[in-house]
Image (spheres, grey):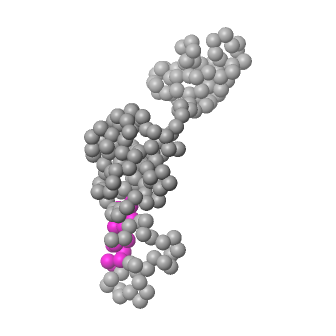
Amino acid sequence: MAELADLAVLDASNSARFGEGQLVPSINDGGRALEGLIARGHRDRSGYTLSSGTGSAYAILTNAAYPAHATGMVFLFRANVVCNGSPTLTVNSLSAKPLRRQGGGLIQAGDIAASQQVLAAYNTAGDYYECIGIGDGAPVAPSYTVASLPTGSAGRIAFATNGRKNGEGSGSGTGVLVFHDGTAWRASDTGATAAA
């Protein structure tokens, strides 16, 4: 059975389901096969799949057939358990491959939460699945001026580029990390309402 990875980029090369001179009654079957092929690929990449497994040994059963790990294999799945370190991903009955951070770094315990959506792309050079969005390095807070800080909700953080740190005068703020406490944006160093 053909899958998305089997389609050719050149239109004229895709003749398996709709051959030249095809009999009219068989066109319906070709159309249905094409729709099934698209639906299987879409489901595997749209977060419908809940992983199984224990600890950090994640496993998924896909809608499409994958005979081997290959370039272009991308899956979006929901993790069934929190990662406790050194995770692997088994796709159908293929051998388990390590899950790595975007960029190739090792995934740490807690990097993947239970029920988190995980976007994993196979990296042929490293022979592992790279988790897009789980990157190396510290997270970066979004930056705003104090006047443009968005409507907040408790727990959000940002960097106020002209926000005042303790001891800085009005209009001379050099920037401060801010958090929203549910009522206002507050400077992280003092807890005072963020001001420029």
Q: Which residues are magenta?
A: 28-42
Q: Is residue 29 magenta?
A: yes
Residue 140 seen from this side = yes
At 39% from the left and 43% from the top, the residue drawn is: 117
Residue 57: which quarter of the image? top left
Frontmost residue, 43 versus 9: 9
The residue located at (56%, 32%) in the rendering is 140
Instruction: Name the spot of residue 181 as percent of width and height, x first.
Output: 48, 20
Q: Is residue 40 magenta?
A: yes
Position in image of residue 175 (x %, y %) = 65, 22
- Quarter of the image where the N terminus is located: bottom left
Labels in figure, total: 0
In x, y percent, where is residue 174?
A: 69, 21
Residue 21 vertical placement versus 191 (above, below)? below
Residue 133 in view, yes or no: no
Foreground residue among 52 and 150:
52
Furthest residue to the top?
167
Q: What quarter of the picture does the C terminus occupy? A: top right
Q: Is residue 149 left or right of residue 78?
A: right
Q: Residue at x 43, y 49 (%)?
A: 129
Relative image position of residue 182 (x, y in whole percent) = 46, 22
Q: Is residue 39 above or below residue 34?
A: above
Magenta highlight: main SS: helix
Left or right, residue 132 beside residue 113: right
Name above or below for residue 164 compared with residue 101: above
Q: What residue appears at the point 37 percent right and 41 percent down from the top-left corner?
A: 87
